Image: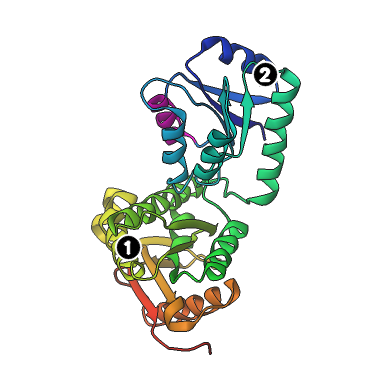
Amino acid sequence: MESTILLADDDRGVANIVGRVLGDECGLIVAHDGLEALAAVEERVPDLILLDIHMPGLNGWEVLEHLRHGERTRTTPVIMLTGCVDDQDKDDGFGLGADDYVTKPFSARDLRARVFSRLHRYAEAVAVNPLTRLPGNPSILSEVEERIRAGAPFGFLLADIDRFKAFNDHYGCERGDRVILKTAELLSEAMRAAGETHGFLGHIGGDDFALVCAEEKAPLVAAFATMKFDEALPDLYDEGDAGRGWIETLDRSGVVKMHAPLSLTVAGVSSVQREIHSYAEAVRWAGEMKSWLKSTRDTGPSALAFDRRRGGV
């Protein structure tokens, strides 16, 4: 699949040069100031961003800070473009999350080498879900293990959509994908509503998500997630199905089956309660809670549960 690159630079001459150097092998999106760059990212997250430091509106440092606080762009490679940069500027930029620098005027060979090297490393290191553009399993594992190493208390949440297969069978994959995208959006909103500014949202696959956040914020994040999902639920269905309160599918024998509306199950574990020593333990204990919660209900609104046991067993 062709990689997409966003170039944010107010110099149209630079855009022409980059287009000639990369245009045949990459899809190029051009923004001429910082605000336009952030708007472009909202529409479509690129595979790599070339970001000029000196731009009108928001400068490159400000745009970079926005990108690194966004769940969908926190791992996107960013190469800074600058006319001149000293060691202190580089240190500051790397501290904000820059991946590399290219100094103007640049050679075609140098630009190509840096861009394709970063794209290759990104593809190998981060398994980004192609639908939601959220970090996948390798990044989720890395996030949890890093918090364990740092000794920072955290909450680990698993979330998935109940009865999603029936919905997908009834409405088709395109509508099912829209539900998954909406769920990702709502989970992100839940973290913001809970005041979690450094939380992590990952997409395990299908209708399964993982969230990592401050330990004290986890219950609130889960509560907002279930509330927001139920509030959005009617808009996911056709009007007739929403009013009736169920959908119908045919099983393999041709028998009509009725299915209750979707709901969201969120289950979590606290590193303070359970002394989590590995990603596998976090998944195991949150997974146990999720399985238990699902076993207690076949229908009804979204629900949440936390592992309140103490210790490491």
Residue 189 within the segment the image draws in magenta: no
- Residue 4 pos. (x, y %): 59, 31
The correct choice, above or below, for 124 with respect to 251 in the image is above
Residue 42 within the segment the image draws in magenta: yes
Q: Residues within 10 Å of mark 1 (few under 14, many from 20)?
A: some
Most frequent secondary structure within the magenta stretch: helix
- Residue 254 pos. (x, y %): 51, 65
Tag in front: 2 or 1? 2
- SS at mark 2? loop
| Residue for point 36% across, 78% down | 297
Rendered image quadrant of residue 5 = top right
- Residue 310 pos. (x, y %): 43, 88
In the picture, the quarter occupied by the N terminus is top right
Question: Is 278 left, or right, of 36 in this rendering?
Answer: right
The correct choice, above or below, for 310 with respect to 181 in the image is below
- Residue 85 pos. (x, y %): 57, 27
Q: Give the amino acid at mark 2.
A: Phe
Q: Which residues are magenta?
A: 34-44
| Residue for point 33% across, 57% down | 190
| Residue for point 38% across, 27% down | 58
- SS at mark 1? loop
Q: Give the amino acid at mark 1.
A: Trp
Q: How many marks?
A: 2
* Mark seen at residue 246: 1
Q: Nearer the viewer, residue 80 or 237?
A: 80
Q: Nearer the viewer, residue 196 or 294?
A: 196
In the rendered structure, are the residues bearing label 2 and label 1 in contact, judged by CB atoms less than 8 Å apart? no
Q: Nearer the viewer, residue 117 or 246?
A: 117
* Mark seen at residue 106: 2
The correct choice, above or below, for 36 with respect to 89 in the image is above
Residue 301, visible in the rendered structure? yes
Q: Earlier in the sequence, mark 2 or mark 1?
A: 2
